[in-house]
Each structure stands twice: as structure tokens, then as C-alpha cells.
Image (spheres, grey):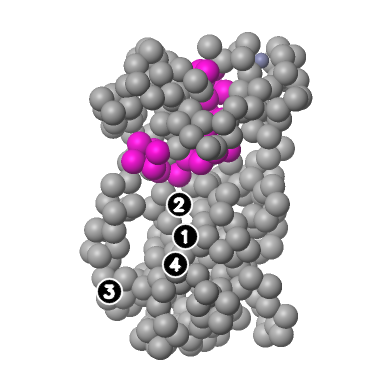
Amino acid sequence: MPEGPEVECTRRYLQPLIGKIVKKIQLTPLSQKYPKYKNKQSDFNWFSGKKLIEVERRGKFLIWRFDGKKIVLNHLGMSGKWILLKKDHRDLPSHAKALIYFESFPYAVFDDIRNFGQFRIFESYDKVLDYNPIRKMGIDGLAKPFPMKEFLIRLNKPNYANREIGMVLVDQKLVAGIGNIYKSESLALAKINPTRLVKTIKKIERKKLGRAISETLWKAVDCNGSTFSTFQIPTGQEGSAQNWHNVYGKHGESCLECGTEITRIVQNGRSTFFCTECQK
Ligand SMILES: [Zn+2]
């Protein structure tokens, strides 16, 4: 699933579209089957003739801003990706949900194989900021410099104290942009066992974890994100961050540091990978 780094890489590769005038935003008939594509085709008529001003990232969301009030909020879901197509293709990706045609530019296609993505209109930027998942979002794991003080304050909240750090770390209200991959990798880098209760983690370890999160997420951005099955940046290239993963998806393999077999556990229905020897 695309996490903060994959969404950030997508945002960066969408930059050639900034300043272009929209000819038309078109939903595909397939999109209408899924609740997160709740607008009608006619709702998108407003965008024709508008200039794309910015594509902003908040956690795992992309916010498409135009020269006017309305906004398109976009989430890549489990498997969404943007593709910039150079010429008019008759063969669209099989799960294309939305297309944006620009003047003086080919077009951008949002392909969402597992249908968990989101592409919907908000009446104003304020309404987007007021949308619960965005309003309640924690610090941005990719913020530079990493907001350590705020991270420590949030991690100290009483509702986290008796929960396992491996569960807490994917809570977007703590750090936005972390999912299963970078949760496991950040904990491995910080040498913290994911089953530890937050209250048992000392301040020095918490700081180490904060630094590990920042380092891990940025390293992934530099590699164009991680590709396991479907993720691609809009040029069609795959990411390569999976090549340096130490623990994610490595259960049964030996830890590169100590040779112990990497363990996989399920926390709150989500996989966590770690080395029982290196991570205490
Ligand atoms: Zn180890």
C-alpha cells in the first residue's frame, strides 16, 4: 500500500502538470461502482478551464488545488497510482477511475486496481482541512526537520500508554504517512521490539524512534518508494526502496545483522516484521 514516501514521490512526478489548464476531468464508468468516487461526472464540469495551481500532500492524501475554490481530494488507497500518458491511448489501464485532460499536455490517469482509492470534490480548501482524517492527522513523518518535540508529546498521550508500539505507529493521528512497511523498518532501525507497550519505552528510545522514522521515510522517497506489486511513480517506473528493507516481508530470512530468523506477527490485523534478537 502506498505510504507517505510513495505519495510524496507521486506528488513530485506530477509537478509537470502544475500551471496547466484543465480541459476536462473525466470519471470512468468503473469509478461509479465505488463509494469513494461519490461525485457525478457533471460535478467535475466546474474544473474545465481552471488552472492547476498545486498538488499538495498531507500524510497519504494528495490535495489537487485549482485557481478557484473547489478542491479534489485524492487518496491512493491500497494500490492507486497516477500515470502520465503522452498520447491518446485507446487502451487505458484496466482499473482507471479518473482522467485529467490538460491543454498543451497529454493527460493523467488515476489507476486504482483494488478500488480503495479516493477522488472526490470538496467545496473549499477549508472544508478539506476540516475533513476528519485530515483535521485529526498527527505530525507529518516527512516534515523537515522532524518535529521531535511534537512527536514526543503525542506519543505520551495516555491512550497510547498501554498499547503496543507496533500498533500505535500506524495511527495517522500520531505520525501521518507511516503504514505497514515503514512501521516495521523504523522499529528495526531504532532496535525496538514492536510488541513493547508504549509506556515501557524510555525517552532516549523514543527519540531514537523519531529519528529512525524520519530517516526511513526519507530514504524511501530518495528511492522513489517501495514497489511490491503495483506501485509506480507517474512516469511508469517502479520504486526501489524494497531493495534495502531489513525486515519487511523478510519472515523466514536471516537478519542481516545477527542471522536470527525474521519473525512475522499480526498486530491489529496488520503484519509486523522484526528481529527478536536485535529489537528489544
Ligand atoms: Zn537481528
Q: Which residue is mark 4?
A: 36
Label pair 1/2, CB-CB below 8 angstroms:
yes
Q: CA distance from mark 2 to mark 4?
A: 15 Å
Q: Residue at x 56, y 54 (%)?
A: 78
Q: CA distance from mark 3 to mark 1?
A: 17 Å
Q: Is residue 42 left or right of residue 267?
A: left
Ligand 1's image quarter is top right
Q: CA distance from mark 1 to mark 2?
A: 7 Å
Q: Which image quadrant is residue 221 in?
A: top right
Q: Earlier in the sequence, mark 4 or mark 3?
A: 4
**For residue 84: magenta?**
no
Q: Which residue is mark 2?
A: 60
**Can residue 131 be seen at all in this image of the molecule?**
yes
Viewer-nearest of discs 4 and 3: 4
User: In the rendered structure, which segment of residues is drawn in magenta?
Assistant: 171-193
* Residue 94 position in % (x across, y down): 68, 73
State the residue in front, 8 or 199: 199
Q: Amino acid at mark 2?
A: Lys
Q: Amino acid at mark 3?
A: Glu
Q: Residue at x 38, y 34 (%)?
A: 146
Viewer-nearest of discs 2 and 4: 4
